[in-house]
Amino acid sequence: MLISKHRFYLVWAIIISLFMLGCAKCITRDWGDRADIKGDITVKYDNFKKVWKYVGPDKYENKKGLFDSQRYFLRAFKSDKTNKTIYQIYVITTSGHWRYQDSAYDNDGNKLDVTVIDRKVGFCDHQLGCSLHEHVGINISEDYLRTYRTTNLKIEVSGSAGDNIIEIPATYTETFMDFVNQN
């Protein structure tokens, strides 16, 4: 019994350490600071698809503990061929149970187009249970996103076994869109 107790505390110490290292900036970020947001936007080019991919910084929220959190970010894809830009809000929900998220609604009651991207089993322990990760993309048009450059965008991501609410600050939306349009 002594070995399993030590193993339990060791596992928790490792998880908490990794959590603190990986999320230090996403917890302390000033979402009103355009320069800070702009500095964390990444850009990659796919030579085969001829598409630019833009990824904004993560917004992380810990709800009720280690296995109940969410992170989300804006991303965009700009095609060289069509010169069109496609926007998406990428949401990763971590929970101790599957929520089967497959729909989303904004704070005006509009149903949004959702793509279920992945469902993964993360860390598992016989005492702690498992962390389950659900990845969904909320597909949004540039015109739709533009309406949230001055007000925060609130969305409920729903599934048959649970939902969660995300909120994208207006400053994040505005900074991200400006960056994509200028690059």
Image (cartoon, rainbow, N blue to C red):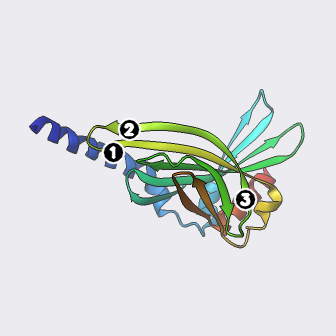
Please name the residue shown 43% across and 38% down the image.
122
Please name the residue shown 48% across and 56% down the image.
25
Please name the residue shown 79% across and 64% down the image.
146
Q: Which of 170/141 is in front?
A: 141
Please identify the residue farthest to the front as the structure is shown. 160
Q: Nearer the viewer, mark 1 or mark 2?
A: 2
> Which type of secondary structure does the marked residue at label 2 adopt?
strand
Check whether the beta carbons of the residues at disc 1 and disc 3 lie within 8 A of each other. Answer: no
Check whether the beta carbons of the residues at disc 2 and disc 3 lie within 8 A of each other. Answer: no
Q: Amino acid at mark 1?
A: Ile
Q: Where's residue 138, x and y in %?
A: 68, 51
Q: Is residue 155 found left or right of 14 in the rendered image? A: right
Q: Is residue 102 found left or right of 110 in the rendered image? A: left
Q: Where's residue 100, x and y in %?
A: 55, 46
Q: Which residue is tagged 3?
A: 111
The disc label shown at residue 15, or none: 1
- Mark 1 vs 2, N-terminal side: 1
Q: Amino acid at mark 3?
A: Lys
Please name the residue shown 37% across and 45% down the image.
18
Q: Is residue 60 visible to the viewer in this orientation of the structure?
A: yes
Q: Where's residue 86, x and y in %?
A: 78, 47
Q: Which of 43/5 is in front?
A: 5
Measured along the vertical axis of the image, is residue 127 above or below residue 112?
above
The disc label shown at residue 123, or none: 2
Please identify the residue farthest to the right as the structure is shown. 82
Measured along the vertical axis of the image, is residue 2 above or below residue 139?
above
